[in-house]
Amino acid sequence: MRGIPGILDEMRSVAPPRQESIDEPTRKRLTDLTAELLAARVDSAAELQRYLSVGHRAVSIPERQVAAAMRGRAVVVTGGSGCIGTVLLRQIRRLCAARVISADIAAPRRPVPGVEYVTVDVRSTASVEGLFARYRPDIVFHLAAQRDPGLAERHVNYTVETNVLGTAQVAWTAERSGARHFVYASTGKALRPYSRCVYTSSKRVGEWLLADVAQRGHMACSAARFTHVVDNSIVLDRLRQWCDDGEVVRLHSPDTVFYVQSAIESAQLLLAGLLSPADDVLRLYAIHDLGWPVSLLDLALGFISSSHRVTPIYLAGHDPGYEESPYPGLYDPTLSGDVSPLLNAIEVHQVEESGCVGIDSAAIAACDAPDVINRLPELQRWCQVGADRQARRVLNEIGWDLLVSTVRATSPVVLDRVARLTEDHRPTMCNEHRRIDDVVRRYALGAPVSSIRPVRTATTAKVV
């Protein structure tokens, strides 16, 4: 039996990346090569089981303290009909006696007893204002979003209207109506300082909008960064559909690995956000130890081996919405194991005690970026007329302005450390990463690294 690298090389030779369709002779050869991979990668079934077992994982939060924050309050959950929203609603109902309202554009598939369900479209000003006028919530969990990175590239306007304009509308209305706590469901992809990917950029801007609200001091704001959630996995749904339909399994790369968490962990992370003090910063919450990342190739092979036939794997390359590799300065390797991998090399220097074992918290002050707010009306106009290309351009420009403003507001000492980490990578950087690095270096030159504030040491380890 030949080695796995040889099999993968032939797969790429037989079917080069970025093909829309695969002809029958190529498909047959890919099927044979996939069978070889299954025989060579005998531990793939165990990887599938390890992945699925994460669905039962939980973190520890101080439930009495969280319950006290909600008891007797009116609590609104936008996106409450979704997977994580439903789990969050169950947790709230279990923990305390509160008036709980789920606001979603879709009807619930599994209604939670004791929850009031209302139809709300966060893209509609009238719908959002009506929600807050009727219920006057004390606490808002904002989960409503378009969460598929690939779909975001195909439906730019819908994604921007929901993830950016909808988030702004809900947050601003909550602040005006006197809400005390606002907890935002973000994504681990938002740790990227800048990205052309629509989904990533939309959530990155969403975090800044919440930080901007927080600095006024009227409403405590926090954001929970999720990574791949097993319970509502886009990847698993696609694998299941491809195998059930006998279609080719399209993988970005055999080297792709990713962190995973459960829906219950996600709900607990959101609840931990209620512990955020009422001051003038946004607090990011992320699970400290996400375990060993999952191999996409092994996950696919494990799923194929559990089905009744060998479904061919095609190494298709990265689809729009997914980055091939991270910016080399995204993580500081000297801090590996000390903080969550969902916090970047700049954010880790704002880490503080979260009050929850196994959860990291970083206090993020809003950088001065007035163009973000000033350009939202322009973004809205393009979305209203269905101009995807123009909306993408404006979102991209907002994202770049936000990067520059964030870097400008960061300690030159921290930036100098990032610049030194990326020095050896500059010759091989893609153009986008070199542009990011150029901004970092513009504000980092000459900064001494010895005065970087150390991060607290954690008790558990993880892979970054």
Image (cartoon, rainbow, N blue to C red):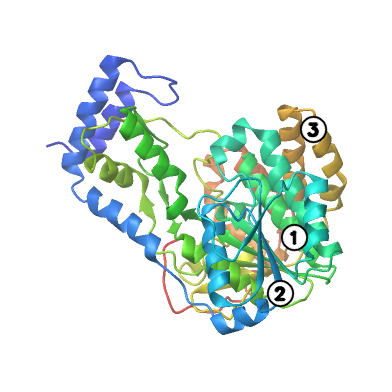
Query: Which amino acid type corresponds to the residue marked 1 in the rendered image?
Result: Leu
Q: Give the residue number, with chain letter if any, for mark 2.
A: 73
Q: Position of residue 408 (x, y in %)?
A: 77, 57
Q: Earlier in the sequence, mark 3 or mark 1?
A: 1
Q: CA distance from mark 2 to mark 1?
A: 22 Å
Residues tagged 2 and 1 counted as in contact (Cβ below 8 A): no
Query: Which amino acid type corresponds to the residue marked 3 in the rendered image?
Result: Gln
Q: Give the residue number, with chain letter if any, for mark 1.
A: 210
Q: Earlier in the sequence, mark 2 or mark 3?
A: 2
Q: Position of residue 196 (x, y in %)?
A: 64, 39
Decide: is 374 above or below 225: above
275 and 12: which one is in front? 275
Disc sitting over residue 199 in the figure: none
Q: Is 138 left, or right, of 284 in this rendering?
A: right
- SS at badge 3: helix
Q: Give the residue number, with chain letter if any, for mark 3.
A: 384
Q: Nearer the viewer, mark 3 or mark 1?
A: 3
Decide: is 385 above or below 84: above
Decide: is 31 above or below 202: above
Residues tagged 3 and 1 counted as in contact (Cβ below 8 A): no
* Disc 3 crowd, CA 10 A, few/some/many (<14, 14-19, 20+): some
Q: Nearer the viewer, mark 2 or mark 3?
A: 2
Q: Quadrant of the N terminus?
A: top left
Q: CA distance from mark 3 to mark 1?
A: 23 Å
Query: Which amino acid type corresponds to the residue marked 2 in the rendered image?
Result: Arg
Residues tagged 2 and 3 counted as in contact (Cβ below 8 A): no
Give the residue displayed 48% in from the left and 66% down from the top.
265
Numbered-mark total: 3
